[in-house]
Image (cartoon, coloured by chain):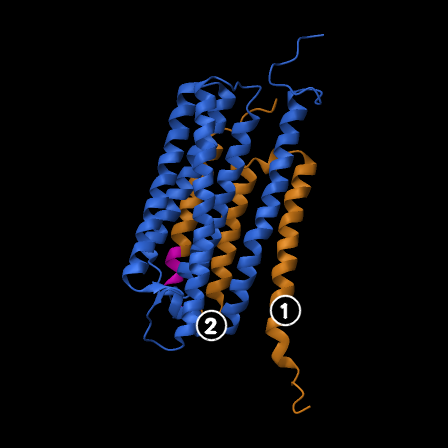
Amino acid sequence: MPEAHAALAHQFEDLEQQHDAATLGMWIFLVTEVMFFGGLLAGYTMYRSVYPSAFAAGSRLCEVTLGLTNTLILITSSFTMALAVHMTQRGRRGLVLALLGATMALGAVFLGVKFLEYFHKYQEHLIPGANFVYSGASAGQVELFICFYFGLTGLHALHMIIGLGVLGVMMAFVWCDRFSPVHYAPIEVAGLYWHFVDIVWIFLFPLLYLVDLHR
Amino acid sequence: MTAQPVSLKTYAGVFGMLLVLTAATTAVAYVNLGFFNVIVALTIAVSKALLVILFFMHLSRSAHRTQIVAGTGILWLLILITFTISDVLTRAWISQPVGW
């Protein structure tokens, strides 16, 4: 019998079963995340159907150019993340470090742009509850839209920050040479999380920034 | 894990399609399609999400039980949103009884 791989936990038959179990566990966590964001999205959809014109007015307060920039940044970071997993499978350690670094840098730029958007909202007195000044019609409902804007993008940004932490740990593991083409489940699972956060933004961008532009 | 890595060409193709779809959803948002603006935006978003899920997240080659778990999550999300919306949108269909 060949000697077991050092990373193989004793409850698993082999590394392949361990990898499948890790992936399955991550997907179960991601499904709970889908429901978590889903509750907010259902609330958003409901209030949007009740106050369509106020939500359209609120939506036009969002900065489309910054939102589009962030969409492109995040999609690119998902691409570099996918490549990082691919290069781990190929055993290209140096490239993996570079790609993880690029993914983290893009994530940091995303958060920077997000911060800029929040700062503009602050300058324009569009902070719900604390400092909300809006002279147009149905200000209360517009404020409700801005609440959803901050709630959804804020939770998304929190996930990005956690993702940056996870990727930082992964970089340290790669640096210490913990992974190999037969053992890379942690980096695959970190990738799943990062891609999930990308998917959330893929829905937030059209729903918050785009759908009412034509009005 | 013993599976061959997805080819770089596939990743590049998916990345390109994601960029094209992002440009498309932004451009179409400036055109007035009435109610269909939301439909088009959501269709493009779902297509982009599927590309990420199937290729970047490797769900097209995952174990069947993983695919079932992912599918279940999406199904439950649809139940949540469909039932909520069907309630809100149909409330006005039946007149409310008054004065008692």
- Residue most toward the front? A130
- Figure chain in orange: B
Provide the secondary structure element on which disc 1 rests. helix
Q: Quick one: B80 or A210, which is closer to the camera?
A: B80
Q: Which mark is residue B86?
A: 1
Q: Residue at x 68, y 8 (%)?
A: A2
- Tally of numbered discs: 2
Q: Is residue A204 above or below residue A133?
A: above
Q: Is residue B92 above or below residue A85?
A: below
Chain ID at mark 1: B
Q: Amino acid at mark 2?
A: Pro
Q: Colour of chain A?
A: blue
Q: Which residues are magenta?
A: B26-32
Residue A43 placement (x, y as % from top left)? 54, 63
- Residue most toward the bottom? B99
Assess whether mark 2 and mark 1 are in contact (beta carbons under 8 angstroms): no
Which residue is identified by label 2? A52
Side of A99 where B59 appears, left or right: right
Q: Amino acid at mark 1?
A: Ser
Provide the secondary structure element on which disc 2 rests. helix
Q: Is residue B93 above or below residue A40?
A: below
Side of A33 where A111 appears, left or right: left
Where's the N terminus of chain A, which quadrant? top right
How far apart are labels 1 and 2 at the CA level? 16 Å
Residue B73 placement (x, y as % from top left)? 64, 48
